[in-house]
Amino acid sequence: MNTKNRIIPPGSTLGVFGGGQLGRMFTQAAQRLGYRVVVFSNEPDSPATQVANETVIGDYLDPIAVRAFAEKVEVITLEFENIALEAVARAEEVTLVRPGYNVLSIAQHRIKEKRTLQQLGFPVTPFYEVRSMDEASKAGGELGWPMVLKTTNWGYDGKGQAKVSNLAEAKNAIELLGPEPLIAEKWIRYQVEVSVIVARTATGEKAVYPMFTNSHSNHILDVTTCPASPELAKVGREAESIAMGVAESIGLEGILCVEFFVTVDGGLMINEIAPRPHNSGHLTMEACRTSQFEQQVRAICNLPLGDTSLIQPAAMANLLGDVWGDDAPYFERALKEPATYLHLYGKQSARPGRKMGHITKLADSVEQAADQVVKIRDAIRCSTPTLF
């Protein structure tokens, strides 16, 4: 029997690299299906470790700890993409890792990601590798000013990047973000940012969620809605097709989010990919027949993929530490609202910009859902004096 293609049935033990909230929600979805979950984390009281059946605390570069973890499970998945490639390589010597080394190596390095997708024929934001001020000048001439300079590794939620409008700003950014090679990307004037989540099993079965529309604040996802507006329906079909193509082309085993810019003329450009569940997919927990986290379990275990159809229009709003004040937010104001779902991640310390939880709101229309979820979030703020 082909070990790669075998089903890993409920009752088995799954592993997850990473202890954050994505690992927490994956663990809870897996446990509902009867799996045990072992979490590998370098933090003892992280969101996922609070709910895991077992936790291995260690450094991702510690081969003994990684091997001990891998020996406990039948398949490992990723909670976020900033996992040391060495850890994945060592784990693959012992057990299955999905997505594995090859996919992670693409998604983890921005230049490799862009080049790979470009070579495969997918639309990406124009880019230029920058190792010196001379190359920064050439990038500005080729891409135009302003442009964005980014680190090639370890960036997320706007970290590790800077918008630059001239060579002087580029010099400051290189000094701040270097010394490793940077990637310069064209500054895209776009209508909206959207994302598509797709799952694929080792046997090649694929399933794609309807396109999500995203709005950001300070480079952090603020609100996600689904379905897209009628004006974006055609774009949505194209984005879903591209995401399916990316998953197939890179040999995905697991779940993948593809983030796009919708340009002013209605075109699509891939901004980045993430081989894991995504913040924009949190609304699938209530709004779709199968959540992205259950789909991740199904995909890595080679089970039939779940129905991705939308049950009802929905909006998701992130709860950052900014919502907290001297005391806890007024969570009861959210819980009294119908078709409103509060998710908290178990983080003990709130600080501005830190993702502490999210709220999902279902409504008769996506416009109603988006309006109401923001009002509910505003109402629960610690400093809010009156009830919603």
Image (cartoon, helix red, strand yellow):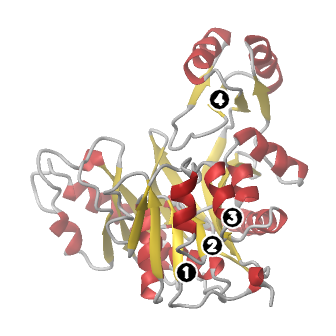
- Marks 1 and 2 close (CB-CB < 8 Å): yes
Return the residue at label 3.
92
Which residue is depicted at the point 50% across and 43% down? 157
**Tag 2 or tag 4, which sits nearer the N-term?**
4
Q: Is residue 355 above or below residue 165?
A: below
Q: CA distance from mark 1 to mark 4?
A: 35 Å
**Tag 2 or tag 1, which sits nearer the N-term?**
2
The amino acid marked with disc number 3 is Glu
Q: Secondary structure at mark 3?
A: helix
**Tag 3 or tag 1, which sits nearer the N-term?**
3
The amino acid marked with disc number 1 is Leu
Q: CA distance from mark 4 to mark 2?
A: 29 Å
Name the spot of residue 125 as percent of width and height, x first.
75, 41
Label 4, residues with CA under 10 Å away: few <14, some 14-19, many ≥20: many
Return the residue at label 1.
310
Q: Looking at this view, is 293 or 210 the one in front?
A: 293
Q: CA distance from mark 3 to mark 4?
A: 35 Å
Return the residue at label 2.
210
Return the residue at label 4.
148
**Tag 4 or tag 3, which sits nearer the N-term?**
3
Give the total of numbered labels: 4
Q: CA distance from mark 1 to mark 2?
A: 7 Å
Which residue is depicted at the point 48% across and 47% down? 216
- Marks 3 and 2 close (CB-CB < 8 Å): no
